[in-house]
Amino acid sequence: MVPQVSADPAGILDYPRRLRRERLYFAFGGGVGKFGTNFTVFHLNGRPSAIPGSADPGASVHPGTTIWVDCGSGFANHHTPGMDKNLPNRQLLLGFPPSAIFLTHGHEDHIGAVPHLAEVIPPGTPFYASPFTTALLTNRLKDRAIDPARWKFNLIEQNSEHQIGDFNVFTFFMPHSIPQCFSVGLEAQVAGETKRVYFSSDFKLKGTEVRHKVAQIKKFAPVDFLFVDSTGSLHDGETADEKEVDESLEKLILKTKGRIFLTTFSSQVERIKNLVQTAARAGRPIGFLGRSLKAQWEAAFQSKEVAQPLHLMKQPSFTSQNALWLVAGCQADANSSFSRLTHGTMAKIRLKKDDTLIYSASMIPGNEGRIYECLNLAAAEGVHVIGVSGDVRVHASGHGRRGDIEKLIGYLKPRAILPVHGDPLHFTSFLQFISDKKVKVNLTEEHKIYALGDEPEFVESVPDETCLVEPGEVHFEDTIYRERVHMGGQGICIALIAADRFQLNQLSYVGVMSQALTKRIERELFTEAAKIAADVAGVAEASREKKFRDRLGRVHQDLLGRTPYIKIIRAAT
């Protein structure tokens, strides 16, 4: 089983009891201010009602109704070396137990936390998701030895309405870059008034999603609050239809000779399905390189998005000179198929001169360096690399641009807008382009609770207990990443000090300087460090090690021009 978030309630605040009754609240456990870890809590606190036998006529029978919208994981970056992923804030996960969970689509940053929450999400909790998202998630749960039957999965196959406690929850299918994505509408009676909230999740307006019905979205208008995807707010116009990409890729494939390798997001099922058909028309065998591509296709078959299971599709021979290979891992993660292919470490197939590599994806901010490294390695082998210059349309985003956002605002006529799914750069851009519209925009933050009255009202902050996942554990100690960054950039100094008295016995360095410099300067460094140890030996135990590190750090800066991480080991003499 994958590492699990503990359900231990120690230190978890009982938020529903702290909040005023008959008010609608929301909080973000991720997905606002940075990309990834999308997790939103909507909570309608219980109406006052008498408990039999209680002298308090306003005692509440139940804590209210809580809806989780999405439950995703976040991405490691250069600030978090060694981390696999992060998960939503544990305070919110445990402090607001869900009455129901709506998963808007199957991207990792929207469903990736669920396999780590087997101890947190109560047995029998109802999930609402499309057939594709359900297939993708339940397959993943089974692979990780978690029985999906512990929860109740309800399929959302059409735009529909569901009664969940005090909420009416509506679903609206929307085009995106993954099959069967939907937005969520919430309607509730709050202090005698009807409140309506529309949560767009990820969306664009052009696409082949047949259940996307603008008339049904307009029928839900006007809304009090529109939570809207801001990812495309940097760009004017509307996001292109996937049909344009399909036509461009078909022309490219038909005129290209030799082997073709194409990397894209594994969840781009519509594009991959079109490529399978294009390959057939071009007389090319098509193969899948990477587990994520195969998992997405299998979920697509189970949910009737594609007609043929993967095991019935004959893989081309690795020696084929005419094959079209689809390659997973377009963000060049370590050990991904794209990374291994371009680095020449894939066991059965290698790039060679006059192959063609099509980069049919976008570069997620922060990943550009390693993606360009892979593309350069391919180019150095004489491979024709297509898709970086932008002169050929080989990709279309799944996120609506400014034109899409403006249209959605026109459909829903919101009283206020809250941008989500973005970072400060996107939120600032959103404010700029929306400034001439007669609608109020409210910027909010994660790890805070807000009440939805006439406008979003800050109520209280929630301790940031973002769950950090590494092999074998979930923890909350972000200091270890600062230490790893420090060690990776500056190296390590190991000071072996006698346990019974603060006397330096040995000083060694790893990854700090060349062996030649070490031989020239190690005696001087040891002498200085030993003097510092003797000076601070009489200092109070609580601050002794810190003073030693601070003073030795200044010596390092003066003599080496760097400040290696100092590890003190107290050893018996």
Image (cartoon, rainbow, N blue to C red):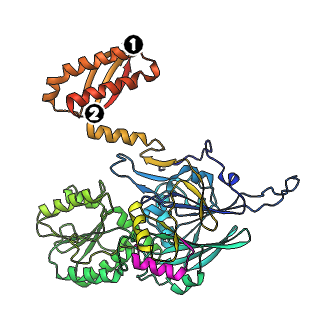
Residue tagged 2:
563
- Is 565 situated left or right of 43 in this image? left
Q: Amino acid at mark 1?
A: Arg
- Furthest-bottom residue in this view: 215
Horizontally, residue 394 falls left or right of residue 255, namely right
- Position in image of residue 495 (x %, y %): 31, 23
Marked residue nearer the N-terminal end (1 or 2)? 1
Picture layout, residue 508 above or below residue 352: above
Observer-nearest of 441 and 523:
441
Taking the image as drawn, is residue 341 in sight?
Answer: yes
Highlighted range, magenta: 399-416
In reply to whether residue 533 is colored magenta, the answer given is no
Neighbours of disc 2 within 10 Å: few (<14), some (14-19), many (20+): many
Vertical arrangement, residue 175 with respect to residue 564, above or below:
below
On the question of residue 201 being in view, the answer is no
Total of numbered circles in the picture?
Answer: 2
Dot 1: what SS?
A: loop
Question: Residue 508: x percent and y percent?
Answer: 25, 25
- Residue 390 occupies quadrant: bottom left
Identify residue type, mark 2: Thr
Label number found at residue 501: 1
Residue drawn at (81%, 57%) of the image? 58
Q: What type of secondary structure mainly makes up the magenta span? A: helix
**Disc 1 to disc 2, how far (Cα)?**
26 Å
